[in-house]
Amino acid sequence: MRKEILKRCLFGMPIGLASSTVITILISVFVGDGAYHAVVPAFAQQMGGELNAVLLQAGLSMIYGAAWAGASVIWDAEKWSLLKMTLVHLLVTTLATFPIAYFARWMPHNATGVMLYIGIFVVIYIGVWLGQYGAMKKRIQAMNAKLQN
């Protein structure tokens, strides 16, 4: 199990980095001022410069990706109910990623920013859950089909 978690975490790291890079590109396009916005200006100031902030954000993005990928083993716990898997996965991903998002200033440090982050997180999480639910449903249907044959 630990080997599988490590394997998935290592797989998730570059995905986290790539995702954050794509997000910064999209943000820069939508800002529309012709500049590339690699990090939040307040984060660059907090880190003593843009390069420091970009390097730290890259590391944090890899941890973010690793956390989500590593937590995916929870969905393989066949003896757990879907509710238990969902709650444990939500808890693990929230505890791993919320502090990163807060520290990297991916959300404003006020109640509105935290609520917006949580709202986006929940929407993404619902998508992940629906995907896992569909995959489980397919597995159950395949098992039932084998039993009938």
Image: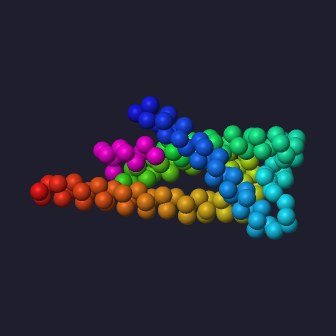
- Does the magenta run of residues contain 29? no
- Does the magenta run of residues contain 75? yes
Is 4 or 112 nearer to us in this picture? Answer: 4
Q: Residue at x 49, y 62 (%)?
A: 127
Is 127 placed left or right of 43 in the picture? Answer: left
Q: Quadrant of residue 117?
A: bottom right
- Image coords of residue 146 (percent x, y): 17, 54
Quadrant (top left/top right/bottom left/bottom right) for the C terminus: bottom left
Quadrant (top left/top right/bottom left/bottom right) for the N terminus: top left
Q: Which residue in the rendered view is the most extreme toward the top?
A: 3
- Image coords of residue 81 (percent x, y): 33, 51
Q: Quadrant of residue 112?
A: bottom right
Q: Residue at x 76, y 57 (%)?
A: 108
Is 46 placed left or right of 22 in the picture? Answer: right
Query: Is any part of residue 95 visible from this angle?
Result: no
Highlighted range, magenta: 72-81
Is 113 placed left or right of 42 in the picture? Answer: left
Q: How many marks?
A: 0
- Image coords of residue 113 (percent x, y): 72, 60
- Image coords of residue 75 (percent x, y): 40, 48
Q: How is the image coloured?
A: rainbow
Q: Residue at x 67, y 56 (%)?
A: 22
Query: Is any part of residue 5 visible from this angle?
Result: yes
Q: Quadrant of residue 107?
A: bottom right
Q: Which residue in the rendered view is the most extreme toward the left?
A: 149
Q: Residue at x 52, y 58 (%)?
A: 125
